Amino acid sequence: MSWPFSVEPILDSYLAVALIVGVLLVLLLVGPQFGSLSPRRKWTLVALRGVVILLLTLALLRPTKVHEVRSPRRPTLLLLFDISRSMQLPSGDGNRTRWEVQKDALTAAQKSLASLADTMDVRIFAYDKQLQPLEQQDGKFEIPKEPLGEQTDVGTPLAEALAAELGKRVAGVFVLGDGVQTAFDPRVESHEAGRRLRDDFGAPLITCAIGPSADVAQGKDIAVDRLDEQFTVFVKNELAVRALVRIRGYVQQDVPVQLQLERPNGQREVVASKTLRASEDGRQIEANFTFVPQEAGNFRLHVEALPRPGELVTKNNSLTAYLTVLEGGLRVLYLEGEKRFEQKFVRHAINASPDIELDDRIIDRRGRGRWPIDVGDTFTSDRYDAFLLGDLEAAALGPEQIAALAAAVERGKGLIVIGGLHSFGRGQYHKTALNDVLPIVIDPLEGSDFNRPDPDEFFLDGPLKAVPTEPHPITRLAAPDENQNAWLQLPALTWAYRFRGVKVAPGVRVLLEAKEQPILVSGEYGRGRVLAFGAPSTYLWPMHGEELEHKRFWRQIVLWLVRREEIDKSEVWVRLDQRRFQPGSRVEVAAGARAATGDVLTNSTLQAMIVFPDGRREPLLMTSQGKQFGGHLIAQQPGDYAIEITATQGGKTIGTARTEFMVFDRDIELSNPAADPNHFASLAAWTQEFGGRSIAPEQLADAIRQIGAVPPEYEVRQSRWRLAGTPGEAWLMLLAMVCVLGYEWYLRKKWGLV
């Protein structure tokens, strides 16, 4: 038998205690003078001092008793049941619906839930696309009258229910329903929620699937389950369309599937087709199509599985997506004076864009004797949309061809001049028509005595960190709140051309600075856009692993020059994050207006109209939300809708925009006649090692009782008592010693010793 007490000597040293007690005992042995007292009185005084030494010894040794306190840890039981509309479908059990079967199971289980009230916390939830907590008292709760949920999401509600129990013990989780997931965009996939239950709680997930996996009367069904809602492609570029088709009841039979293109006038044509064959029932098969749009515009795509004999539900045989075909075939000409690093990497960056075709030409300055070269109708035809001039002297092209280039920019072409030792003023461009085109000031002195070594006053020495001066489509490398850091993380530039000044003119803006000096300046000339970029060392970015940023930067330069920085040419825009909706869904609309330079027109006024499927038009309230406008509507009626935006500024219309969306004429909850017990079984399998399993509805009450019968877990806490361990006990110990010493002094005085 172990001794229940231990000691904790002061200073954690028995030696210190022994020394102190030893000194006191020696003093006691030497003893005071007792005079002529009788032996009995002498020993009384010695005994009293011995008691004081004993009390002090106990205080120095600090006797301690440790004992354990075990208290049961109160667990939680979670129960979730399905209230989506698919529970109105037949259960396969006589004439009862799935809702009736589930309701009977829940009613029968309430007595079992009530028996757990004293030992664990019971939480009851209903779920469709969202989690809905229900009030319960001693296991009893009110079951909704009917299931009305528009979509079913198993994973997100389960994850939300578990999130509230983090750090607690979960005894078990019950999930009831038909197992069919119909939510378009679940925030948490069901299997991810099952994995969290296993890893974070180590508790069993017990699922109860209600409904037939394949009813004889409704087992034949072909459904297009997945198709992206919108596509964007450049004209004459190949578009890949991927859909998922689920086939039930037609195993080893050919199922024709078509990709149809619908024009704005409603005319449809089949642009691709294929035949699918399912090797097992209920399998999802990919239907992959490709086609090349031949004209720009807004279209619709339909993936349609042709109805088969015996198929009762055909509303789910097709899905629709929106297609925007943009004008493509951008052509850019890059003229350089030498094969420098910047030319090589810029060429690779632009060529990485499939919608941009780049032609480049090196005009070697060693052939200066044959200058100006003849570029034919390069600048007078519409062959190119934009031009890049690198480290190239003006004499290489000659004043007449440079004037033709300036005229091309005035007609609407884009131009960027990239800094070099022989560009801008150093390249004698102040004597040409580009002096008026460029957004920077060229000092004639820059080109004086050209054969002398280049003076430092014309260049900015590196390292140079490029910093955006304001938001702009060209300099957007990351989200607005992260863009500045994205630029600061890029490698520093080695040097840059020092601009003598920036013109004061409409559209002229400094986009990038380094050492508080402009290195990228934008401007407009006629209908064209112009850039002056003084830093010819962006090749350092891909050389140091920033290839994506380098490609994005140069692509955005080209798109901005040709006024396609937002893909759409429209200055007014309207955006929907979703283009297909269920009846009764909330449709969020965002819209705005921007200038040709990319500036947000915050002082513009937007008017929005809703065009309903029946042609009726109603205004849509749009409110300012900073740099854009926002509004919403509830779309009840199935069919095709449109949002039309008109932007005005100062009473003048600056542009319009239109976008379309559709409300399903098919009930996703009721279009799938089969339950999915396999989904629930695989979900429960995540916690099989802890007792997770699938059960029948009539087994629910017994399964709950089994959870309650599991022995409780206990939380063990240690309780410590130590002599004089509290202020009150310490004062009592001190009072005891004072009382003994006081009594000893009283006796000594009474017996004439003091």
Image (cartoon, grey):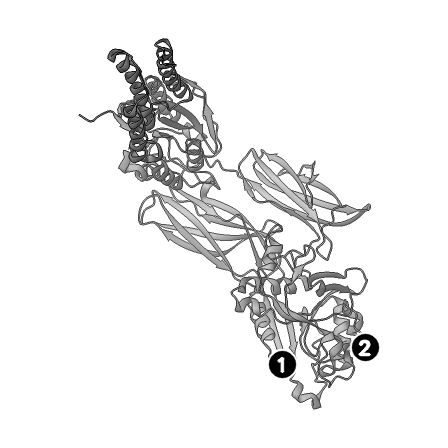
Above or below, 507 against 480 in this view is below
Q: Is residue 554 left or right of residue 284?
A: right
Distance, label 1 to label 2, CA atoms, is: 24 Å
Nearest the viewer among 295 and 342 is: 342
Question: In the rendered image, which quarter contains the N terminus?
Answer: top left
Above or below, 96 against 448 in this view is above
Nearest to viewer (mark 1 / mark 2): 2
Q: Secondary structure at mark 2?
A: helix
Q: Which residue is mark 2?
A: 444
Say which residue appears at 51% left-offset and 65% top-offset: 545
Residue 688 sits in which quadrant? top left
Nearest the viewer among 6 and 579 is: 6
Counting labels gives 2
Q: Residue furthest left?
A: 1
Q: Which residue is mark 1?
A: 338
Q: Report x, y in % for residue 202.
A: 32, 36
Earlier-in-chain disc, 1 versus 2: 1
Residue 568 sits in which quadrant? bottom right
Nearest the viewer among 253 and 451 is: 451
Residue type at mark 2? Answer: Pro
Say which residue appears at 33% left-offset and 28% top-offset: 60
Q: Identify the disc placed on residue 259.
A: none
Q: Report x, y in % for residue 547.
A: 54, 65
* Crowd around label 1: few <14 · some 14–19 · many ≥20 (10 Å): some
Q: Report x, y in % for residue 439.
A: 77, 66
Q: Secondary structure at mark 1?
A: loop
Above or below, 15 against 746 in this view is below
Say which residue appears at 57% left-offset and 60% top-offset: 489
Question: In the rendered image, which quarter contains the C terminus?
Answer: top left
